[in-house]
Image: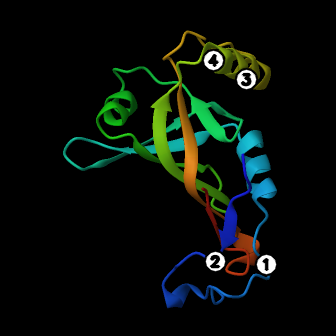
Amino acid sequence: MPEPIAERPGFVPGYGILPADEGAGLMPWGDAAAKLTASRNYWVSTTRADGRPHAAPVWGVWLDGALLFGTDDRSVKGRNIARSPEVVVHLESGDDVVIIEGVATKVFDETTMRKYADAYEEKYAFRPEAAPGTAYAVRPRVAFSWTEREFPGTATRFRFG
């Protein structure tokens, strides 16, 4: 996966974000990817048919530039994703932030499913069903990262090709 473009996010002026042309303090994507890999829980946010938000924690693995996680098609998440696959995923910490925005797509590739099940089992000591179509992948279109301790100096937006 090519390295994303790192830049300042476009927060409103009151947040104290440095001007967009100042690159000092930008977080490296490798740090954000390492946090995505190490995280135990991920919050997936979807939208219900009537427009109300829905957020739920999931277990998952960061694999080949995407977050892979499972959910039943009949769950609220599953129904929401089937209707509108745009999602936001973030880690648990508000002090060490990584947020990704992207489209959740079902994984049908058997090789990817096997890698997902292997990585999941190694991480959680539980092997999920590795049948094609039982997991979703979210590749970031845009991501955000910062540390609360060094905010706003570390506030970074990553744009992916």
Q: Which amino acid does label 1 sit on?
A: Gly
Is 12 placed left or right of 41 in the picture? left
Q: Which of marks 3 and 2 is in front?
A: 2
Which mark sits nearer the N-terminus, 3 or 2? 2
Which mark sits nearer the N-terminus, 3 or 1? 1
Tell me the distance, in whole angstroms, between the alpha carbons under discs 3 and 2.
35 Å
Which mark sits nearer the N-terminus, 4 or 1? 1
Identify the residue under disc 1.
25
Q: Position of residue 106 (x, y in %)?
A: 48, 26
In what element is the residue under mark 3? helix
Is 48 placed left or right of 111 in the picture? left
Q: Residues within 10 Å of mark 3 (few under 14, many from 20)?
A: few
Q: Residues within 10 Å of mark 1 (few under 14, many from 20)?
A: some
Identify the residue under disc 3.
124
Residue 113 image label: 4
Tell me the distance, in whole angstroms, between the alpha carbons under discs 3 and 4.
16 Å
Quadrant of residue 84 in the image?
A: top left
